[in-house]
Amino acid sequence: MNTLRDQFESSSNTNMNPVTINTAENNSNSNLNLTTTTTTVSSASSSPPSTPSRYENQKRRDWNTFGQYLRNHRPPLSLSICSGAHVLEFLRYLDQFGKTKVHTQLCPFFGLPNPPAPCPCPLRQAWGSLDALIGRLRAAFEENGGKPEANPFGARAVRLYLREVRESQAKARGISYEKKKRKRPLPRVQDPSQPSTTTLPPPSSNATNN
């Protein structure tokens, strides 16, 4: 019993709430009441932090890029006064980094999806990239405390601009951005080698009486 007492007393040096343990040993001689102080070890099961998805990483990079654009603007802009017009300026600014060839109406390859030779037409941001970018920035704006009704990325001017870009690029590149309609499943055709099963209606009450 002295060994047990020493173990508990040696562990009472830490600053923990004292816990009283009553240990009784029944024998023919006497009942021993042992009052000791122990330390409790709590193991916190902490799950490893989840890795951000590719979408979340891209959204964070886009948000940082837009914030840098506002800081470098002349004069500098704050997010609180940012409007749809500033978003349009940002989208046009990104065109200089575009990689999509958009043919002009004077180009002989206008409307050809696969031009046979290079041409001096400018490179632009593809409509699909801009549309996805606006979607991520619109979500990031509200996640960073912005009100949905004041979201500049959801302004009507931005939606109209994206629609114009989609239509103009579709004509210039000779491609269609329309969503493909889902094909309806064809009706099942019964195998002529299989006997047809016809469900007959139940007999009427008049026929039963007759």
Image (spheres, rainbow, N blue to C red):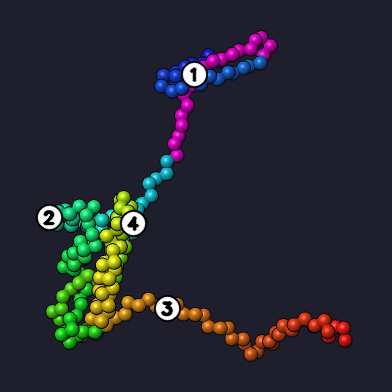
Q: Position of residue 144 (x, y in %)?
A: 30, 51
Nearer-N-terminus badge (2/1): 1
Q: CA distance from mark 2 to mark 3?
A: 47 Å
Question: Which of labels 2 and 3 is toward the front?
Answer: 2
Circle 3: residue type: Lys
Quarter-wise, where is residue 149 in the image? Answer: bottom left
* Cα distance in 3D space between marks 2 and 1: 68 Å
Which residue is identified by label 2?
75
Direction from residue 138 to residue 1 in the image, left or right: right
Q: Nearer the viewer, residue 17 or 166?
A: 166
Locate the C terminus and report the quarter of the image it occupies: bottom right
Disc with the residue nearer the chain's start (3 vs 4): 4
Amino acid type, residue under disc 1 in the picture: Thr
Alpha carbon distance from label 1 to label 4: 57 Å
**Foreground of the two, 87 or 155:** 155
Residue depicted at x 21% and y 84%: 110
Residue 181: mark in rendering: 3
The amino acid type, in three-letter code, at marker 4 is Pro
- Do the numbered discs 2 and 1 sit on residues whose CB atoms are within 8 Å? no
